[in-house]
Image (spheres, rainbow, N blue to C red):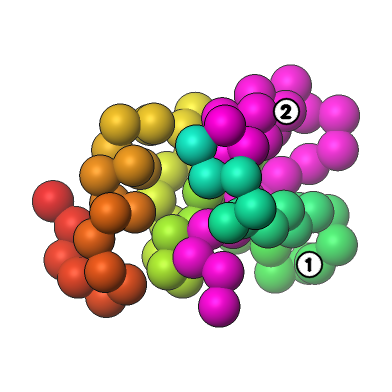
């Protein structure tokens, strides 16, 4: 199971920035999902992309909080986040 998912939109400059951050800190450990591929994703996240999902839960949106994400990724899946 991939721990990190980025819900993104083609042509979104914030999404491109988020992708670059994830490539730098978690290369090969994340997947990208196009928000427009799903009505549910569009409804839930359409105006907030990019959205970072860690272990199936929303971690943040618009900007990647790099230090917080690295800290939370260091915890085992399912461990409480601070």
Up-down relation of residue 78 to residue 13 (above or below): below
From the viewer's perspective, is the residue at label 2 or at label 1 nearer? 2
SS under mark 1: helix
What mark, if any, has residue 28 been given in the picture? none
Q: Residues within 10 Å of mark 1 (few under 14, many from 20)?
A: few
Residue 42 x %, y %: 72, 57
Q: Is residue 23 left or right of residue 72?
A: right
Residue 42 in view: no
Residue 50 x %, y %: 62, 39
Residue closest to the eye, 67 or 6: 67
* Callouts 2 and 1 close, C-beta under 8 Å: no
Residue 29 in view: yes
Q: Earlier in the sequence, mark 2 or mark 1?
A: 2
Q: CA distance from mark 2 to mark 1?
A: 22 Å
Q: Residue at x 61, y 45 (%)?
A: 27
Q: Which residues are magenta?
A: 1-24
Q: Residues within 10 Å of mark 2 (few under 14, many from 20)?
A: some
SS under mark 2: helix
Q: Is residue 46 left or right of residue 70?
A: right
Q: Is residue 8 magenta?
A: yes
What mark, if any, has residue 16 been given in the picture? 2
Residue 74 x %, y %: 28, 54
Q: Residue at x 63, y 37 (%)?
A: 23
Q: Residue at x 32, y 72 (%)?
A: 77
Residue closest to the eye, 70 or 56: 70
What mark, if any, has residue 39 been given in the picture? 1
Q: Residue 69 is drawn in which quadrant? A: top left
Q: Residue at x 55, y 78 (%)?
A: 1
Residue 5 x %, y %: 59, 58
């Amino acid at each position: 199971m991939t721990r990190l998912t980025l819900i993104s939109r083609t042509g979104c400059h914030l999404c491109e920035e988020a992708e670059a951050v994830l490539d730098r800190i978690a290369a090969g450990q994340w997947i990208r999902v196009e928000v427009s591929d799903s009505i549910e994703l569009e409804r839930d996240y359409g105006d907030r992309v990019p959205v970072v999902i860690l272990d199936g839960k929303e971690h943040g949106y618009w900007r990647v909080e790099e230090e917080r994400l690295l800290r939370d990724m260091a915890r085992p899946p399912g461990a409480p986040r601070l």
